[in-house]
Amino acid sequence: MMGLNDVMAVLGRCKAQYIRALQASIMTLFAIAGPIVIASAGMALDMSQAYLVRERLGHALDSAALAAASLAATDEAAANLRLQAFMNANYPPEKMGTAYNLNMVVEGDNVRVSANADYDTAFLWILGIEEITVYSETVVQREVQGLEVVLVLDNTGSMATDNNIRALKEAATNFINILFANTSNPNTIKVGMVPYSNAVRVGRYGIGRTPEGDTYNGGERFVTLPDEVSYTSNHDSSSGWYGCVVEHMDDDYNPSATHVSGSRGQLWKTGNKMNGHGWNPEVNTNDPYPDDVSLNWQGPWDIYQYGTVSRGSCSEYENQCTSYGNVCVSSHEECTRYRSNGQCRTWTTVCDEYEYGCQNYQNVCTSYNYTFNPNSTPNNGCPYANVVPLTSDQDYLLEQVEPDVASDMKPHGNTLGNIGMIWGARVLSPEPPFTEAQPWENKMWRKAIVMMTDGVNTDDSNYSAYWFSNKNQMNTTKFNNRFLEICESLKDEDVVIYTITFGDGAGSVTSYYRDCATSESKYFDAPSQDDLIDAFEQIANELSNLRITQ
């Protein structure tokens, strides 16, 4: 029997053997697992450092993107310079990780900025991973400070049917109230209105005054009002100008032309030519294109005076022939080329020079007395309602469209939707004649037009914004095509266009209004008055949702 000491000795020997065996096992295990443990620790360290590089890169991108976003839509070069400057300041070269591939992309209201950075590993190179590339991007949503929208409203005679004009005024009222209800800052909303029919009424704005008679735009005039005609606030005046205009006719326009007395601004003369302001009563091909579709045309315009122009007696003669017998031996080139036995075989309308008198010509008229014959109401076809330039005055806007008040918005005249649309564009343009709008390139403000009609374009048989109908070759096809041309120009300026066809009178032109709209979803067919009101409300809510305010 072992004594305690023997047992302890045996146990001691066993313990020593066990320890020696355990040490050998640990050494073997460590030899196998050691590199893995070290690599794992190194990977964790390198990965944490790579995440730190990405986090620093992200913070630098945030600062740079915020700084550049305000310039991104208007000056790309300046925006990129600012982007790089802020990136250098917030992620200097001495920072861990080398940044590169700095890139900025503008996507609508979003500015997307991205960059890469390389981190040189401290441990993972053992496993062949010498470098880790990180990527970061940030998106800044540019703050749209405001909305400018113009309502182009059909005020033609057909809107009297079932008192449709009242429904239109109710729809416009709701539209205005919805927009202003959805903003905490009314100054971020500007609304303008362009009622239209045969023409558009710019009113006193055209002569540098507001409707109330105050100075407008420094008193600058964009309408030529002859001295013999005065402005009137009476639509039915037999002589005054109510405020409508005819489109500009560029050919041979002479700002110093002489007004033909009694013509009420319809006839202007340069020398013995009657086309002093471009419109020429001696031809039937007058056409103001492309000024009638241009977003940049700033005037001047001539006044609208419904009536007719007719040719009177001959007023001037050039080398009038008063005798017969001898022949013309020197006239126009065509005539002088052909001489046989002292006679010209070919004659032109007027002989310039005569030696022996004229043969077969007497009283050759070179200039006629054209006269203007006004209608008993020369403002016939001119809408009652005035253009309203962009304004944030909600109360003033509502006064123009009060449904149950006898405001100036009354049905009258034929339909020229293209004229309404171009004046809507002119109100929305930052250039004269109206100057309330923000620049086209200022993406901090969104621009929109709501165009509404209840009928097809109609060529007045006598007079319109295209002057006297028998003195031009205008037709509904031209009106429709020019309407679309204006729409495309507005889309090029990123204007959001909504169109509404009301009732069943516009059936044949719905395709034009559908094509004019920015997208299919922004075209509305409104068969009934309730549908018309709903369309305006839906558009107002959509425009409100598009706005992102500070």
Image (tube, rainbow, N blue to C red):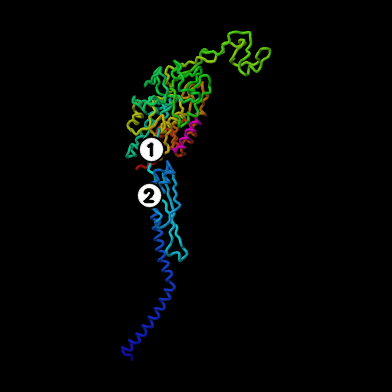
Q: Position of residue 31 (x, y in %)?
A: 43, 74
Q: Position of residue 388 (x, y in %)?
A: 38, 29
Residue located 33% across and 33% down the image: 394
Q: Position of residue 352 (x, y in %)?
A: 58, 15
Res 410 visible: no
Front residue of 316 and 153: 316
Placement of the N terminus among the 4 image quadrants: bottom left
On residue 147, the disc is 1
Disc 2: which residue? 63
Label 1 with label 2: CB-CB less than 8 Å: no
From this view, report whether residue 398 is shown above or below residue 468.
below
Q: How many marks?
A: 2
Residue 141 magenta-highlighted? no
Q: For the view shown, which residue lies furthest in the bottom direction?
A: 1
* Residue type pointed to by label 2: Ser
Give the image location of residue 329, x and y in percent: 63, 13
Q: Main secondary structure of the magenta part?
A: helix
The crowd level at tag 2 (other Cα within 10 Å; few <14, some 14-19, many 20+) is: some
Residue that appears at 44% across and 36% down: 497
- Of the 4 image quadrants, the one containing the C terminus is top left
**Closer to the N terminus: mark 1 or mark 2?**
2
Q: Is residue 10 left or right of residue 489?
A: left
Magenta span has 492? yes
Residue 357, placed above or below residue 7: above
Which residue lies at the image location 68% right of the left edge and 12% below the top edge?
341
Identify residue type, mark 1: Leu
Q: Nearer the viewer, mark 1 or mark 2?
A: 2
**Could you say which quadrant of the image residue 12 lies in?**
bottom left
- Tell me where the magenta segment starts and ends, as one range: 479-494
Q: Around disc 1, counting alpha carbons within 10 Å, would you say few (fewer than 14), some (14 to 19), or many (20 or more)?
A: many
Cα distance between the residues tagged 1 and 2: 27 Å
